[in-house]
Structure formats: structure tokens, C-alpha cells
Image (tube, grey):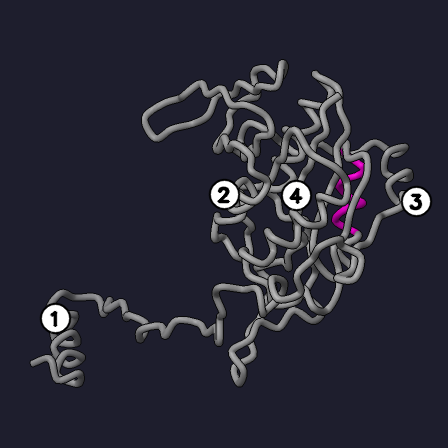
């Protein structure tokens, strides 16, 4: 039976996030959250593998207590158990320290044959997490999968997308997979699964409960990149459409504007 790990993330609705003009920080208070859509594509791929070859899916995320809602959403569509990494010391983490925290917590649940995660998160969009996790899990990596074609005898074969076509790749397990979203559409839960997920027990690991965790490698201390400030780009002055009714007056108005800007 395959032991499958799916890494998911709860993100703010990026269309509703605002910025504090004084501090340059994102204002997340009161902003609705959602499960990173590309992680749901990865979960669907994992569920299809489980249905075809058998296995157990463990979900894992790192975040505040409210991230439990994301785990319950994923339990309702095929996950078997869920782990939440949560604690103030994990805050402010970049991808380097996040991947370290995930791998250390995942080790508490045993070894995994397959790891699935989204190609990127819609809030950060670095696209770094998958490769960092593959390295830390000492796993092979197949990215941009269009289909998982075979799993068995300690190997996986998959078809992945390239800029110039497709490629069939075979790798040894453990292997980390990212998928193309247009090939794995997230499914909706049925009522029974939804109700069961609401009552499911979620394992929570704090910084004090993960064996061997180095506190200097998590959160801000373990982050190789620090973002001191975020600010919106300065937009240029909006353009004007000159439409007076005649070409002569349009040109005259254009010359006036150019003169006002010192361009003549």
C-alpha cells in the first residue's frame, strides 16, 4: 500500500488583500481565506493514484489554527489523515524554513512513497517549494505531470508537459509530483464525506512536539530571504483620449498637452 503525502496551503483571497500604506505590510485581518487552488489539483492527482493503486493519503500544512479548515476541505475529497504544523515560532517563514518544517513534521508520520504538491501558491508564486521538498525528502521529482501512468515495483512512470511537447519519465520512489491544473480538476465532496471531515481528528504539531526540530531553522531565523517591505508599483499618469470631433482640433489639443509637459 502506497504511503502518500499531499502538501497544501491556506492562502488569503489575493483579490481582497489590502496594503497598509504606512508599514507596507499586507493587511490580512478580515480577509477571507481559501485553499491554494493548485494544491487541490495535486490532491486530485493523489486521490486518483490512491483509487487506482491503493494507499493512504496524509495531508500536511503549516499555518495558524484556522488552517484546519483547509485540511478538513481536503479530507472531504479523499484525504485520510491530516497534520497541522502551528506555532508562533513558525511565523515569517520563507520557502526554505517552511520546507524544513514540513519535512521534519512529516517524518513523525513515517516514510512516504509519493509526495504531491501544487506547482506554486497563488499568494507567493515563487514555485520553489516543490524542488526544496524533493531535496529535503531525498526524493526524485517529476514536475508538470499530465498523467501518472504506472506505479509499482518501487517505480513510477508519468507523462509530463514540455514547452515543445510531452515526455514520458520513469523515476524510483520516493518521488515528488507536481501536476498540470487542466488535467486534474478538484472534485466536490459528497455529503457523507463532508460531515465526516467536519468531525475528523487533526494532529497538531507545535515547535515543541516535532522530534529533532532545530528552532534556528524555522520561522524568521531559518529564512534565507527577508522581505522588509511590500509596496504597490508607482503608476504613471493616466493617458487621455482626445476626441473633439475634428482632426484639426484634436491635433491642436495634443500640441497644447505636449507644451504643458515641456515636450515641445
Pointer 1 with pointer 2, Cβ within 8 A: no
Disc 1 and disc 4: Cα gap in Å? 60 Å
**Disc 2 target residue:** 131
**Range drawn in magenta:** 69-77
- Neighbor class of circle 3 (other Cα within 10 Å; few <14, some 14-19, many 20+) is few
In this view, which residue lies farthest toward the left? Answer: 264
Distance of mark 1 from mark 3, alpha carbons?
A: 71 Å
Q: Residue at x 76, y 45 (%)?
A: 108
Label 4 sits on residue: 7
N-term-proximal mark, 1 vs 2? 2
Residue at numbered disc 1:
251
- Going from N to C along the chain, the mark reached first, 3 or 2, is 2
Residue denoted by label 3: 199
Q: Quadrant of residue 136?
A: top right
* Mark 2 surroundings: few (<14), some (14-19) or many (≥20) residues within 10 A: many
Q: Nearer the viewer, mark 1 or mark 4?
A: 4
Above or below, comparing residue 172 to residue 205 in the picture: above
**Eye-nearest disc, 3 or 4:** 4
The quadrant in which the N terminus is found is: top right
Packing grade of label 1 (10 A; few <14, some 14-19, many >=20) is: some
Give the label, 1 or 3, closer to the camera.
3
Residue at the (55%, 34%) spot, across then down: 139
Amino acid at each position: 500500500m502506497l504511503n502518500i503525502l499531499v502538501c497544501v496551503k491556506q492562502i488569503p483571497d489575493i483579490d481582497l488583500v489590502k496594503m497598509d500604506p504606512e508599514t507596507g505590510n499586507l493587511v490580512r485581518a478580515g480577509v477571507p481565506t481559501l485553499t491554494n487552488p493548485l494544491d487541490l489539483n495535486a490532491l486530485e492527482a493523489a486521490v486518483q493514484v490512491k483509487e487506482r493503486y491503493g494507499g493512504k493519503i496524509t495531508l500536511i500544512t503549516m499555518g495558524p489554527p484556522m488552517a484546519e479548515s483547509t485540511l478538513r476541505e481536503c479530507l472531504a475529497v479523499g484525504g485520510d489523515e491530516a497534520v497541522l504544523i502551528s506555532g508562533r515560532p513558525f511565523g515569517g517563514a520563507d520557502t526554505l524554513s517552511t520546507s524544513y518544517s514540513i519535512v521534519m513534521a512529516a517524518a513523525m508520520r513515517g516514510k512516504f512513497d509519493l509526495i504531491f504538491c501544487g506547482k506554486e501558491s497563488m499568494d507567493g508564486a515563487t514555485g520553489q517549494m516543490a524542488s526544496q521538498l524533493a531535496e529535503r525528502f531525498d526524493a526524485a521529482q517529476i514536475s508538470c505531470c499530465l498523467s501518472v501512468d504506472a506505479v509499482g515495483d518501487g517505480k513510477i512512470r508519468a507523462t509530463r508537459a514540455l514547452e515543445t511537447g510531452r515526455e514520458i519519465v520513469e523515476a524510483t520512489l520516493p518521488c515528488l509530483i507536481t501536476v498540470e491544473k487542466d488535467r486534474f480538476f478538484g472534485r466536490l465532496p459528497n455529503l457523507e464525506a463532508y460531515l465526516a471531515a467536519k468531525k475528523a481528528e487533526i494532529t497538531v504539531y507545535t515547535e515543541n512536539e516535532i522530534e529533532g526540530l532545530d528552532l534556528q531553522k524555522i520561522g524568521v531565523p531559518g529564512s534565507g530571504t527577508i522581505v522588509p517591505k511590500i509596496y504597490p508599483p508607482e503608476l504613471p499618469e493616466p493617458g487621455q483620449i482626445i476626441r473633439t470631433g475634428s482632426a484639426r482640433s484634436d491635433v491642436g489639443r495634443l500640441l497644447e498637452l505636449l507644451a504643458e509637459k515641456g515636450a515641445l
